[in-house]
Amino acid sequence: MLRPLRFTANACCLEFEMADKIRLRVVTPSRMLLDEDVDEVTAPGELGEFGVPPNHIAFLTTLVPGELSYKQGSSKKTLAVGGGYAEVLDNVMTVLAPAAEFADEIDSARAQRAKERAEKLMAELDRGEKDWEMAEAALKRAIVRLQVASREARR
């Protein structure tokens, strides 16, 4: 958030202090997963991955299932999000997601079973069927959950 530092007699000389952190809030229907000041956020947008540093312009976008990561100092943390929306306003990024979880919360065996069920269903259906799209979305969510869990296990 920009904060006035000093007002001068000439309005053109108004100076502002730039924030060095951005507030990240990740909210699901069941809980507030995260509410912290961070150095930078990277999120999976509908049009591709995007980054949000402190003092970013305001915007609203849709998210796709993917990895949301953020930096705090030299530490980088990642969580799986199941789509949703992201809003950046006044140096606060709010993520509203139908599901989101940190790597240590992911049940890899359950995610693997969900992946296998979705793949099996997709193999049995035609691409144009409504259930095929739902199975594809479930497959994407399961793959993201497995990627986030395995990446954390390698650290």
Image (cartoon, grey):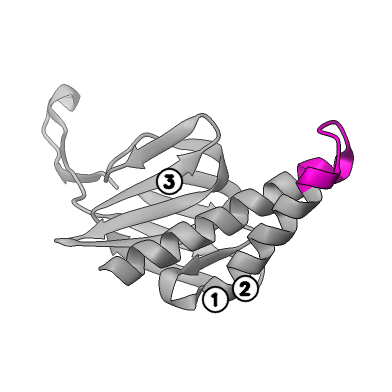
Q: Which mark is residue 110?
A: 2
123 in magenta: yes
Q: Which mark is residue 48?
A: none
Look at the numbered disc 1 and give the secondary structure of its residue: loop
82 in magenta: no
Which residue type does callout 3 highlight? Ala
Of circles 3 and 2, which is in front?
Answer: 2
Which residue type does callout 1 highlight? Asp
Look at the numbered disc 3 and give the secondary structure of its residue: strand
Mark 1 and mark 3 in contact (Cβ < 8 Å)? no
Other-residue count near label 1 (Cα within 10 Å), few / some / many at <14 / 14–19 / ≥20: few
Other-residue count near label 3 (Cα within 10 Å), few / some / many at <14 / 14–19 / ≥20: many
Q: Which mark is residue 107?
A: 1
- Residue at 57% of width from left, 74% of height from top? 109
Query: What range of the chain is rendered magenta?
Result: 122-133
**Residue 123, x across and y down, in percent:** 78, 44
Q: Which mark is residue 43?
A: 3
**Residue 68, x across and y down, in percent:** 42, 53
